[in-house]
Image: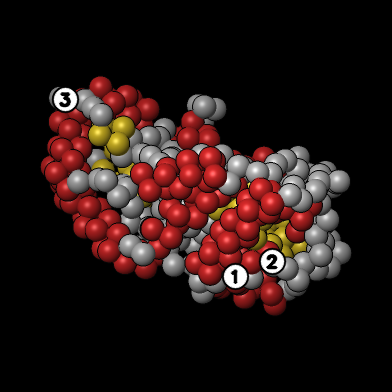
Amino acid sequence: MIYFDFAATTPLDAEAAEVFVQASTEFFGNSSSLHDIGGQSQDLLENCREELAILLGVNKKGLYFTSGGSEGNFLAIEALLSAPKKAGRHIIAGMAEHSSIHGVLNRLDGYSITYLPLNASGLIDLEVLERSITPETVLVTVQHVNSEMGTIQPVEDISRICKEHDIHFHSDFVQSFGKIDLKKIAPLVSSFSFSGHKIYGPKGIGGVYINPAIAWKAFFPGGSHERGFRPGTVNVPAIASMTAAAQKLNDQLVQSQERFLELRAILVDSLNPIKEYVHVHQAETGSQLPSIVGLRISGIEGQWMMLECNRYGFAISTGSACQIGMQSPAKVTQALGLSSHEAKEFIRISFGKTTKREDVVKLGETIVDIVKKFKL
């Protein structure tokens, strides 16, 4: 089986795995314990916090570790709403946000929520965003990189608009963490979330940054870990492993982007024999993460195409793994304004550090063969 679903999750990096085992066996103490063994674990935890803060270009006092991106999104939004910059009960969110964002917004009582669609290039229209702001708007939440088609939202511009109107800005960085240099972007938002398993770290670990100037109130009162941000013993081994994986990817950012651009071009070229049926949803190069390819093949349901590819030994997807179990179309298709028929045609192909050129060619040829047999 050749894997083309790296946007869903990644295998644990061998070096990160070694760090996990070492931390689990040598730094096993509870980081909140006051004895020396707990102190050693605490030292490792704080070292990881500092290293990640350096990678992200933020104040380490604003970094908190969570069980992953979904929990991070939930706690970040709750924290921002506990300390709004002004009175109000209106929130603006991207229509294509991750299901964890929709989940927390759906449970809020007393708030009105405006969902922003995407333009044809998969980007938020800044003029529509500005027109949607009211005196009651207290929060904007827009993901940095869309998990289903890889478009990169203009965080700098959104941040500027939010600051002009005294609005908190949360951004889901799960798909951009470890793939884009975030040093210039991360300090611009009120909060962001990230996850370990998207960057060859362990599952069940991630984090949140909240600007230290924000006096948030804990969603879970009485918690003693992570300065009260969340309850539960801190998973120091997973944090150390995630940090090692992040550092390793950060050292390869430029080379990785160049390679993914090449692989993307190879895939698109390999689909030329059926190009009249193929619709690649993407933005211009500067606003597109090259490792995620979201596309439709006219007349063929994405789920059927995914199962056929699986039968031929290729793992692709029909969108976010957090959405698939619901058997509903990828949220990005709704945000793009596609019909229900078109939405069902959507598939996602995503590359990783082990993806080979010849495997991309094989995948493209296989998709062409599947389509030709189907259309005959």
Q: Position of residue 180 (x, y in %)?
A: 42, 63
Closer to the camera, 221 or 163?
Answer: 221
Mark 1, other Cα within 10 Å: few <14 / some 14–19 / many ≥20: many
Q: Using the image, tell me which numbered label, if any, was put on residue 373.
A: 3
Q: Where is residue 216 in the image (x, y as percent from the top left)?
A: 80, 60
Q: Position of residue 326 (x, y in %)?
A: 54, 27
Q: How many marks?
A: 3
Mark 2 element type:
helix
User: Which residue is disc 1 drawn over?
Assistant: 58
Q: Position of residue 352 (x, y in %)?
A: 32, 48
Q: Which amino acid does label 1 sit on?
A: Val
- Classify residue 81 by image quadrant: bottom right
Foreground: disc 2 or disc 1: 2
- In primary-sequence order, the first of circles 3 and 1 is 1
Classify 31 as above or below 106: below
Q: Using the image, tell me which numbered label, if any, was put on residue 348.
A: none
Q: What residue type is labelled 2?
A: Lys
**75 left or right of 119 in image:** right
Q: What residue type is labelled 3?
A: Lys
On-image quarter of the C terminus: top left
User: Which residue is disc 2 drawn over?
Assistant: 61
Q: How far apart are marks 3 and 2 (CA)?
A: 58 Å
Classify 326 as above or below 148: above
Q: How far apart are marks 2 and 1 (CA)?
A: 9 Å
Mark 1 element type:
loop
